[in-house]
Amino acid sequence: MPKPKLSVVVTRRLPEAVETRLSELFDVKLRDDDTPMSRAHLVTAMKSADVLVPTVTDEIDSTLIAQAGDRLKLIANYGAGVDHIDIATARQRGILVSNTPGVLTDDTADMTLALLLAVLRRIPEGLSAMQSGAWEGWAPTAFLGGRIGGRRLGILGMGRIGQAVARRASAFGMQVHYHNRRRLRPEVEEQLEATYWESLDQMVARMDVVSINCPATPSTFHLMNARRLKLMKPEAVVVNTSRGEVIDENALTRMLRSGEIAGAGLDVYERGTRVNPRLRELENVVLLPHMGSATREGRIEMGEKVIINIKTFDDGHRPPDQVVPSML
């Protein structure tokens, strides 16, 4: 008899090509509408499936994992970040967790530079003037922003994405600096023309732009807290395409309102979709709806990684992108 197909539950709508391939390989349950799965439906899914395919919008905490059935053996996350999954509890229950690293590196780095340019060159203000019909012609002092070349960029987190940001920033003529848990190898530093700072405080105080590119972990929660934000120069800006929890959003909002920080470009927020309403009122802030990974190519490649992780697991091997607590 042929081996029965794995039961796979997908919590959100995925690109059609990904859903089609999943359906060919597994006994898959797909969503009809593109909304987050309720907690009650997540419980049902985790009791009945061999594999759960969640996204960043699903909070897979210890309480939820405790209600999982004996069948659930793999949480194949659709996305690189796994801070919404209690990895340690899953491991205790014998449930493997995998993710999709690497495929979104260039897309997220592109968005980091887009936000940097948007803030420094005041692009949204110009766009608003054109769309509203308020523009009356060129003027020597209108929409004055700042030149990109020659500015100091401090990258917080020099992994795949941080390094991709560094390469792009160098092409714009920026001076690249970074702080990381571990210093890069000398040959990598030389290639990126990047200067390492052991002290985050000292780096932040000297940068024109600070880019957040580190993952969300207990050690990075509010790494950019009120005290550290106050170290930034008044003319500096901060860009975050990583995780909102790395920045104390209330402190950032207060300092942006008071002019203690010149501007910010944000694609992620501390409380998910519940964005601080005072941020929306500020002209020196560019807000995007978590678009860093939103390319057709990237989302299909994410799905392909999910499929490889599930198929490898189904074949009796460790998923190539398995996540364990020691990696966090």
Image (cartoon, rainbow, N blue to C red):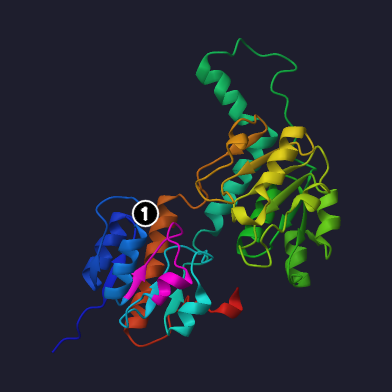
In the image, what residue type sits under mark 1? Answer: Pro
Mark 1 surroundings within 10 Å by alpha-carbon count, few (fewer than 14), some (14 through 19), many (20 or more): some
The image quadrant that residue 166 belongs to is bottom right
**Start and end of the magenta stretch?**
51-66
Q: Is residue 216 left or right of residue 257?
A: left
Q: Is residue 104 left or right of residue 65?
A: right
Q: Is residue 270 left or right of residue 17?
A: right
In the image, residue 117 sits, relative to residue 167, either above or below, namely above
- Residue at the spot 69% in from the left edge and 23% down from the top edge: 143
Q: Looking at the image, which residue sits at the far top?
A: 136
Q: Quadrant of the N terminus?
A: bottom left
The image quadrant that residue 191 belongs to is bottom right
- Residue at the spot 83% in from the left edge and 66% down from the top edge: 198
Q: Quadrant of the C terminus?
A: bottom right
Q: Nearer the viewer, residue 209 or 186?
A: 209
- Residue at the spot 55% in from the left edge and 51% down from the top edge: 271
Q: Estimate the x, y position of residue 121 in percent, counting from the top left.
A: 68, 32
Residue corresponding to mark 1: 36
Q: Estimate the x, y position of residue 248 in percent, counting from the top left.
A: 68, 51
In the image, residue 173 sits, relative to residue 282, either above or below, namely below
Numbered disc 1: secondary structure? loop
Q: Estimate the x, y position of residue 169 in percent, counting from the top left.
A: 69, 49
Is residue 238 part of the magenta span, yes or no?
no
> How many numbered tags mark residues here?
1
Q: Looking at the image, which residue sits at the far left?
A: 1
Q: Is residue 53 left or right of residue 235?
A: left
The image quadrant that residue 16 belongs to is bottom left
